[in-house]
Image (cartoon, rainbow, N blue to C red):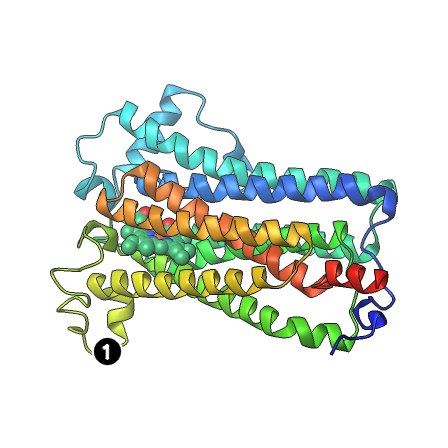
Amino acid sequence: MKQPIEDYSPVAACKPLVSLRARKPIFIWLLTLAGMLLGMISLGGATRLTGSGLSIMEWNPIQGIIPPLSHAEWERLFALYKTIPQYKILHNGFSLHDFQTIFWLEWIHRFWGRLMGFALVLPLIYFIYKKMVTVRLALILGGLFVLGGLQGLIGWFMVASGFNPNSTAVAPVRLVLHLLFALLLYAALLWTAFSTYWPKQPLQQSYKTRSSLLLAGAWFCLLLLTLTIIAGGLTAGTHAGFIFNEFPLMGGSLIPADYAHLHPFWRNGLENTAAVQFNHRLLATFCSLAILTLIFCGLKKRLERHTQISFILLGWAIILQYSLGITTLLLVVPVWAGTLHQTWAAIVLGLLLFVIYQLHLKPLQISTLAEQKSE
Ligand code: HEM
């Protein structure tokens, strides 16, 4: 039976986050910040994969903005680097020039973080001065600025773990924490951007019921994606991508023979590289299948055009991500593939968030509604 047309219509809209005239510039600014964060995630991947992350051994949030300017300063920093296990075990024999190469990548990574702080605060002050943002939005963005600072601290917490005796890389769990926090910030920026451009319109009960299954499915996909990303972080952190460079088998069988050789069992999920890689593959497969099923179900309904487009883009993005994962593995983790695979995970996350946001707000069957009106 067809529902009465009124059932589809939104009830009174929530108070918007910005005024109508400020909507576009603030949306573009927030998207630019999210884009910068994506660049930061990419730089982070390249820094890790080139072994550059431990080259700056000092934590100077303010003075660190100035790179070494004299030969003596370079020599001092290089001498400091020579004291850590990574130099002794992996980079023994490095020249000053080699050191400078890895130093610059880490320096740019940190510099980009500071730049993002300015790109958030300076326009925010301007928008507040011009009364273009509500107090609520100013508070949200102020909160994100503080979280950004906290991310810098987590970054240092991660780097510090690489200076432990006999350690040549950072602790995998801290790497995952740093990656997750970056993605949390990125998701919060995107969600805020969506909320400024498409203010929330709570919908009537009958619409909610009709879209709720799809929405629940989308949230479930987000959960699976998050778990896959955590498993990906552990794969990267434990260097599990450098073994079993074959697909779909691992050492001739679907489940690697020594999947559970550590005791107690839970340690395998964190330390046993065979199990870590297998978990990432398995979760990635479930996650990709769940997202493709969601898209199949979503496209069967008559969605608004840009919701439909975001579903299709998400479909292609997840297929590409899965293929990039396999490519990274088969090629034994070259820097370009590992960086792209890490960055693309954030793009998939952004698209899934966009789909979820759309499903929260938009009537599913606008075209049906139009048809009913004309009947
Ligand atoms: C839904 C699909 C997938 C997602 C969202 C995903 C996500 C990720 C993420 C975020 C990382 C990097 C984490 C970090 O650098 O801290 C990662 C690493 C990795 N992934 Fe995936 N992945 C997916 C599918 C796959 C597949 C199918 C494979 C191979 C069978 C794979 C193999 C790898 C490998 C080898 C690494 C480690 C690379 C390195 O050391 O930099 N991934 N994955």
Q: Residue at x 75, y 49 (%)?
A: 197
Q: Residue at x 46, y 38 (%)?
A: 109
Compare residues 104 and 292 and report the one nearer the observer: 292
Indicate the amino acid at tag 1. Phe
Position of residue 180 measured from the top left corner of the image (x, y, whole percent): 47, 58
134 left or right of 153?
Answer: right
Q: Secondary structure at mark 1?
A: loop
192 left or right of 130?
Answer: left
Compare residues 123 and 282 and report the one nearer the observer: 282
Q: Looking at the figure, which quarter contains the C terminus? A: bottom right
Q: Confirm whether residue 151 shows in the render.
A: no
Q: Quadrant of residue 338?
A: top left
Q: Residue at x 35, y 46 (%)?
A: 324
Q: Confirm whether residue 291 shows in the render.
A: yes
Position of residue 358 measured from the top left corner of the image (x, y, whole percent): 67, 58
Q: Residue furthest front?
A: 375
Q: Which residue is mark 1?
A: 265
Within 10 angstroms of label 1, few (less than 14), some, or many (20 or more) residues?
Answer: few
Q: Is residue 206 above or below residue 162?
A: below
Q: Residue at x 22, y 46 (%)?
A: 330
Q: Quadrant of residue 275?
A: bottom left
329 left or right of 42?
Answer: left
